[in-house]
Image (tube, grey):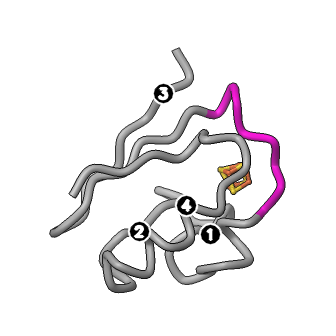
Amino acid sequence: MGLKEYKGEKITVSFDGEICKHAAECVKGLPEVFNVNARPWISLDRADAEKVVEVIDRCPSSALKYKI
Ligand code: SF4
């Protein structure tokens, strides 16, 4: 139920709010893309897809996943 999908030009990211551990690796790693105060909170076209991938790889819970 908690799964949401966000589409950017080059990358699609899914986020499962139920398994997020709120470690904030995403918001610390790329605040222009992952901004909990914005709606939608993930804006993929504000950074290179490679950067987004790098930060998502650091997510400890695998709540964030990507497709290129
Ligand atoms: S890095 Fe992963 S676990 Fe941490 S807040 Fe972001 S989505 Fe949640």
Extreme residue toward the top, this view:
1
Estimate how packed mark 2 is, as few (under 14), some (14 to 19) or many (20 or more) residues with alpha carbons within 10 Å: some
18 displayed left or right of 4: right
| Image position, residue 13 (x, y; %) | 37, 50
Image: magenta residue range: 17-24
Q: Is residue 23 magenta?
A: yes
Residue type highlighted by circle 1: Asn
- Asked if disc 1 and disc 3 are in contact, CB closer than 8 Å, the reply is no
Ligand 1 within 8 A of label 4's CB?
Answer: no
Q: What separation in Å lies between label 1 and label 3 (alpha carbons)?
A: 18 Å
Residue type highlighted by circle 4: Asp
Q: Earlier in the sequence, mark 2 or mark 4?
A: 2
Query: Label 2, on which residue?
Result: 43
Ligand 1 within 8 A of label 1's CB?
Answer: no
Query: Label 4, on which residue?
Result: 57
Foreground of the two, 52 or 40:
52
Query: Label 3, on which residue?
Result: 3
The secondary structure type at the circle numbered 1 is loop
Q: What separation in Å lies between label 2 and label 1 (alpha carbons)?
A: 8 Å
Q: Nearer the viewer, mark 1 or mark 4?
A: 4
- Asked if disc 2 and disc 4 are in contact, CB closer than 8 Å, the reply is no
Q: What separation in Å lies between label 1 and label 4 (alpha carbons)?
A: 18 Å
- Asked if disc 2 and disc 1 are in contact, CB closer than 8 Å, the reply is yes
